[in-house]
């Protein structure tokens, strides 16, 4: 049996980003492996320069998620515009402002982009580390989530949690699917859930590949893993 940390993602708005297409920032129905890595690293107070530490943490994370309410009604799209001139610059994570090129006519129209969000998010996650005895430990992550070094957000910086993220512990669960059933709302049935392949296959309606990892050394997103999608029922009423 393994020990799992229970995370609660409750927020007015949240963004589980997928592969961005042009100016359309799409979302998935589950957080990315890289997003959870960044969230935990932010709570610990790590900086972007700690690339090896980020990479090692990402490779240790094993997690699953379950929706506490329906997904379809929760999506919304934010339409954004900005009138940008040739002399306007943008800040980058490289620490060097990004300049702009092109003729005067290219700035006649407003810049447009679309950003998808989950509204009124209610989602539970279970997470363990493999290996469990390396640093940081689950207990260190739990302490950081309760007293984070910096403000935490769920996906985009405008997406602030509305409740304490640390929900407690699942002390004995053989796999992610079993742990998810232990944190699902009492007596609930037919809840949409996602968990890694090999972490419980019962109830999976499909198994697919997601590209939700990041190469923290190069700074580029890439790398895929196999996940199960299916419905689960709470095991709380079986106690």
Image: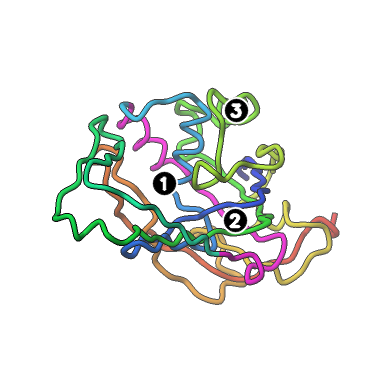
Q: What residue is rendered at 39% in x and 55% in y? A: 212
Q: Position of residue 58 (x, y in %)?
A: 40, 41
Instruction: Read off the residue under disc 1.
Output: 34
Q: Is residue 206 magenta?
A: no
Q: Position of residue 238 (x, y in %)?
A: 84, 59
Of the numbered discs 1 and 3, the one sitting upstream in the chain is 1
134 above or below 179? Answer: above
Q: Viewer-proximal residue, 33 or 174?
A: 33
Q: Position of residue 52 (x, y in %)?
A: 30, 31
37 above or below 53? Answer: below
Of the numbered discs 2 and 1, the one sitting upstream in the chain is 1
Instruction: Read off the residue under disc 3.
Output: 139
Pointer 3 local density, CA inside 10 Å: few below 14, some 14–19, many at least 20: few
Pointer 2 local density, CA inside 10 Å: few below 14, some 14–19, many at least 20: many
**Secondary structure at numbered mark 3:** helix
Q: Position of residue 149 (x, y in %)?
A: 54, 23
Q: What residue is rendered at 41% in x and 63% in y? A: 226
Question: Marks 2/3: CA distance?
Answer: 20 Å
Q: What residue is rendered at 42% in x and 60% in y? A: 25
Give the magenta part as a residue range: 50-76
**Secondary structure at numbered mark 2:** strand
Instruction: Read off the residue under disc 2.
Output: 65
Q: Single out the mark in the foreground, 1 or 3.
A: 1
Q: Single out the mark in the foreground, 2 or 3.
A: 2
Write down the quadrant of residue 164 in the picture: top right
Q: In the image, 148: left or right of 170?
A: left
Q: Single out the mark in the foreground, 2 or 1.
A: 1
**Secondary structure at numbered mark 1:** helix
């Amino acid at each position: 049996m393994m020990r799992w940390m229970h995370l609660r993602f409750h927020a007015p708005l949240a963004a589980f980003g997928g592969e961005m297409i042009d100016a359309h920032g799409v979302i998935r129905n589950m957080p990315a492996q890289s997003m959870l890595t960044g969230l935990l690293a932010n709570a610990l107070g790590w900086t972007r320069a700690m690339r090896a530490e980020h990479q090692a943490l990402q490779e240790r994370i094993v997690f699953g998620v379950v929706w506490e309410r329906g997904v379809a009604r929760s999506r919304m799209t934010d339409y954004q515009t900005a009138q940008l001139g040739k002399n306007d610059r943008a800040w980058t994570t490289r620490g060097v402002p990004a300049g702009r090129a092109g003729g005067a006519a290219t700035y006649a129209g407003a810049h447009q982009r679309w950003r998808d969000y989950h509204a009124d998010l209610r989602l539970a996650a279970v997470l363990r580390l493999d290996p469990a005895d390396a640093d940081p430990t689950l207990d260190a992550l739990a302490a950081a989530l309760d007293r984070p070094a910096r403000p935490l957000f769920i996906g985009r910086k405008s997406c602030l949690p509305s409740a304490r993220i640390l929900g407690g512990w699942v002390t004995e669960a053989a796999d992610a699917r079993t742990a998810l059933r232990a944190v699902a709302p009492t007596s609930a049935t037919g809840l949409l859930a996602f968990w890694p392949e090999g972490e419980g296959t019962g109830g999976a309606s499909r198994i697919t590949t997601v590209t939700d990892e990041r190469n923290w050394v190069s700074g580029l997103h890439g790398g895929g893993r196999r996940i199960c999608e299916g419905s689960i029922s709470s095991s709380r009423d079986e106690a």
